[in-house]
Image (spheres, helix red, strand yellow):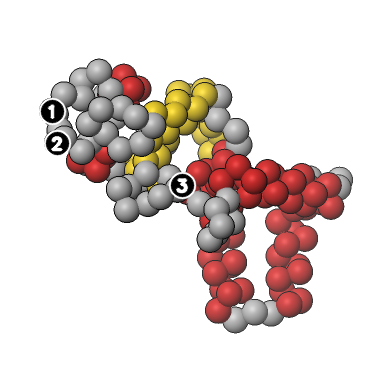
Amino acid sequence: MEAQDIKGFLKDPDEMYMRYFIYNFFHARNENDPEQAWKEFADKVREVNKMFGTTSSPGYQSDRGYIYLKYGKPNDIITVENEPGSLPYEIWQYNSIAVKDHRYSNQFFLFYRPADMITGFELLHSTLPGELHNNGWRNYLYTDGYPGNNSNSRAEQYLSNY
C-alpha cells in the first residue's frame, strides 16, 4: 500500500498529502518520536549510498541498497569475484527476517554482476517469500552452462536446494 501511495505522489504530487503520509509513515515506526525514526532512516540511506552508490546512481536505487534498507544488514555476505565458470556474485544470508506477522529463518539473496555491467550487482534470486524467486538463476550466473563444472560453486553450496 505504501509503495502504491508513493507511486501516486510521483504521478500527481500533492504536498500536503505527502507531508501527511511521511509523518504517518514514521509515526507508525516510532509513535513517541517520529522525527527520530526519520533521522535513523536518513542515516541508513546515507550509509547505503556510500556502500552501493556509483557515479551514475545513488545506492538506494540499487538492488543491494533496496534490500539493505528493507531488511537491514545481512548476517553474512559471501563475495565471489573470480570463480571459474561464473559471473561475479554475492550471497547475502539473513539468519532471521520478520515480514509482517511472520518470521523467516535462514534466508538468502543472490546478487550477480551481469556481463554488461562494470560495477554494481543485480538481484538474481531470493529464498524469501515475496521477493524475486528465479528458478533459472543458474542459467544467468554460470558462463560455462549449467550443470557444467559448477558443483563446487559457493552458490551451489548455499542455494542448491532453492
Residue 52 relative to residue 126: left or right: right
Q: Give the residue type that dot 2 points to.
A: Gly
Point out which mark residue 148 bears: 1
Label ID, residue 145: 2
In this rendered view, identify the residue nearer to me: 63 or 38.
63
Q: Tell me the residue at 45%/26% (across/down).
A: 78
Numbered disc 2: secondary structure: loop
Quick one: quadrant of the C terminus? Answer: top left
Where is residue 102? Give x, y as percent.
Answer: 52, 34
Q: Residue furthest right?
A: 32
Q: In the rendered view, does 57 fall on the left or right side of 160?
A: right
Q: CA distance from mark 2 to mark 3?
A: 23 Å
Q: Which mark is residue 120?
A: 3
Q: Nearer the viewer, residue 156 or 145?
A: 145
Residue at the location (60% across, 42% down)? 51
**Where does residue 133 sit, x and y in percent of width and height?**
33, 42
Left or right relative to 77: residue 110: left
